Every structure is written in structure tokens, then in C-alpha cells.
Image: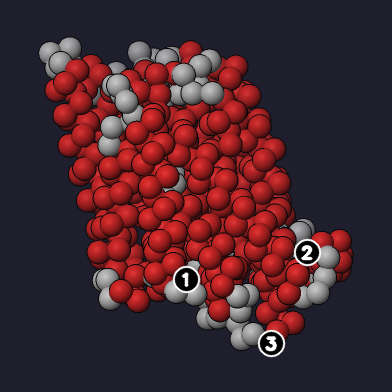
Amino acid sequence: MSPSIILLCFVAYTALLFVITWLTARKSTNRSFFIGNKASPWFVVAYGMIGASMSGVTFMSVPGWVGTAGFSYMMVVVGYVFGYIVIATVLLPLYYRLNLTSIYSYLETRFGFWSYRTGAFYFILSRTIGASFRMFLVVNVLQIFIFDAFNIPFFITVLIFIVLILLYTFKGGIKTIIWTDTIQTTFMLLSLVMSIYLIINSMGLNLGEMINKVYLSNYSKMIFTDWSDKRFFVKELLSGAFIAIVMTGLDQEMMQKNLSCRSLKDAQKNMFTFTGIMVAVNLTILFLGANLYMFASYKGIQMPLKSDDLFPVIAITHLGPLAGLVFLIGLISAAYPSADGALTSLTTSFSIDFLGINKRPELSEQQKKRIRQTVHIAFAIVLLMVIVLFRAINDRAVIDKLFTVAGYTYGPLLGLFAFGLFTKFPVRDRWVPLIALLSPIICYFLSEYSVDIFHGYRFGFELLILNGMITFAGLLLFRKKRGPAGAD
């Protein structure tokens, strides 16, 4: 398949995004950038969130994961369902009642200044790293199959993507992303379905025969009962629930989209609809993974060194030009939501949580807009640098890295919000940054030596829960017996 044809598809797809940007970003304001004027249709948000939550990580890593973990990831997805229910029934009512733009403003109301800044800092750290991981995975493949053919360095490739994302989010922000995410979700889902069809067709099977073949194989194993195994189903259920809560409900990027809905009722309908679609999509992705491994066995294809590479290798080199083009269009669709929502939410959090532009009446709307745009450009540069750095140190499946990092950086957020919601204790606010710093460090050492300390037990995604519990315990230890919340 010619790199020129792929590049033409990339340009055409990007042009489509800019048409949507032109339609949605006209007469935009700071309010439309941050919360879409509270006018986003809930069903559009629900559908678009699929693409934003999947991104390139799920698109490539999860299918490759099937070779060693089977369908055990579905236990994590079932856990997501419980987490999304908590978000819809507990967190969204809180955010709407307080009329928040940045969800971390809650921590200032509940605990005080230092808790607020700590929560916002951990989000910025988490989202910067996570978005960089996701985008790296996608751009690295496009580099190999498109831009290397034109002798374009990886740095320039990333720069092109970042500049494009910067341009189409610069004015409209969340108002634009709500609509561009729907396009990206559509192309990703079409890519998945078409890839499955092409694999099944090349093996001379129909869909029913392939479903039966997968069901009878070891790949379909979903429940692992060995308590010391990282895939132990109870650990995955609990981990999935808490991952959903922190990586969606305590994440400014995902909640910013929910907060752009017209009302709490619409936001809740969005979350429940999104939940149902997400379960079906993840099951489809795992089914695709089993298809890929069976196709490789059927054709005698040697397994790539990294499981992340299985999908692109088969799609581009073994299934013909159409499959390669379908895969790359899906991948291009995954590249944009890996960074556009992150860039917008990082801009929102820093502008509101650290610069406090919403609390400075001396600033005109035009001055606030200039500050927000400067922050937007600054975070685009940060993402560029982190992606380039990550390419130099990547050495294992990206999805594993993503959730490991999330376990350390989202854990303090989980502890802070849980303590705020489920206790009435005020805390010694100035001690909160130290607690939030020590918690991941303690968690790291417990994880590293868990086999010796806990008689063979190995931590998996439940590392996030441990981290949150340590933060919660630290807050409980340094709680105030009386006095107003946030006072020392």
C-alpha cells in the first residue's frame, strides 16, 4: 500500500475535522471552551466518549493482550460498569450541585487550598503522562508506515499532530471536541468491524463459525480463580470499578464533557448510555484479538516481539491493501482523541485551578482568553516533549504502562475524594501534599516486594485501590478534631 495514498487519507480526514471545527467554533467564548455553554446533546457526548476512552491504547494493546490474558479484561470492563454507576449517581450530582467547571474545585470547598492544588496537580501529571502514552502508540505506527517513507523524523511527525490538534481545539475547546469525537468514534468502530470481517473472510469462515471457534479456544477464558494471579477475577472486578471512578469520574477531561450537558439528568443519561456501548465495544475488541491470533496460527505468521504490534503487522502486511487502509484510518481516528481532550482539559485545569482566572474580576474576558490560549500552547509543547521522551524509554505493552502510572498518580485523587465524600472530618490542609506524595512511594515499595511480604501475592490493577487506601489512611491520621474544614 502506497504511503502517498495513506497520507492522502490522513489529509482528507484532518480536513473533515477542520470543517467541523469551523462550524462549531464560531462565536466561541471562554464559557464555550470550558463547558460548551452547557448545551451539548447528551447522546452526542455519550457516543463521542467511546472514542475518547478507547484511543490508540485500547485499539492496539487490548487485542494483543488476548494472547496471554484471554478475555479476562472483560472482568475489568464489568468492573467499569459498577464504577460508571457510582459516577452517575454520586459524582455527577455533586458536580452539578456545586456548578463546577473544574471538578477539583470541590477539594477547596471541602478541605482547603493545599488539598485543591494537590488534586489538580495530580490530574495534570496523570493526564499529561497518560495522553502522551496513548498518542505515542498511535503516532509511532503512523511514523513507521507513512512518515518514514518521506524521511520525516519522529519529532516532526509528533509536531505535525500536536499543531493540528492545537489549531482545531484552540478556539472552540470542549464545544468543538464534543462533535469531532463523534467522527473519530465512528471511524474507529468501522475499522474494528471491517478488520473482523476481513479476517473471517480470509479464513473462509462466517461470523457464527468464528464466534464458535473463539468460544471453544483458550482465548475466550474470562475468569481466572488463582488469587495470586494478576488476572484473578475479583481483583479485576474491583480494579475496573475504581479505574472507572478515577479515570472517568475524577478526571477533568472526561467530566468536562459530562458537565457540558444541559442538565444533570442529561449527563446521567449520557453516562448510562456510554456504559452500555462501552461493554459491547470492548467485547468486540477482545473478539478481534482472538481473531488476530487465530489468523496468525492459520497462516503460520511469526508472532511479533511486542503484542502491541500484532494488529498492525497482520492488518498491513498480511490482509491486503484494504485491511491496511482500514486499520490506518482507525488508527488516525484514535490519534486525535488521544490528545485533543487532554489538551483542552489540561488548559482548563491549569487556567482555573492554578491561575484562578474565574476568580479574578479585574481581568476582562479578552485578557482571560489570552491567558487561556497561552496555557493551551504551553501544554501542547509539554505533550510534544513527553511523547518524544517516551519513545526513547518504551519497553513494554503501553496499556500496562498506562494503568501502572494511573495507579500511582490517580491513587491520591481517589483517596482525597473518598475521604471528602464518605467522612465529615476536616483535615490539616497543609499536610495533604505530603500525604499525597508519600502514598505512591509506599505503594511502590509494597508492590515491588509483595511476593515476599504477602506470600506470593502479585499486585495488578488493584494497585490503584491500595494507593487510594493509603491516602485515605493518611488523611484520617492527620484529620482535625474540630474547626472548619480547610483551616489549620
User: Mark number for residue 300?
Assistant: 3
Tell us which disc is closer to us: 2 or 3.
3
Q: Residue at x 61, y 51 (%)?
A: 189
Q: Which residue is mark 2?
A: 220
Of mark 2 and mark 3, the one earlier in the sequence is 2
Of mark 1 and mark 3, the one earlier in the sequence is 3
Q: Which residue is mark 1?
A: 396
Tell me: 378 left or right of 31. left
Q: Nearer the viewer, residue 152 or 54?
A: 152
Kind of residue at badge 3: Gly
Question: Of helix, strand and loop, which one carries label 2?
Answer: helix
Q: Residue at x 46, y 19 (%)?
A: 39
Kind of residue at badge 1: Arg
Question: Of helix, strand and loop, which one carries label 1?
Answer: loop
Question: Residue 107: where, in percent of width, then height?
Answer: 38, 25
Q: Is residue 312 above or below residue 73?
A: below
Quadrant occupied by the C terminus = top left
Question: Residue 308: where, in percent of width, then height?
Answer: 53, 69
Q: Are marks 2 and 3 in contact (CB under 8 Å)?
A: no
Question: Of helix, strand and loop, which one carries label 3?
Answer: loop
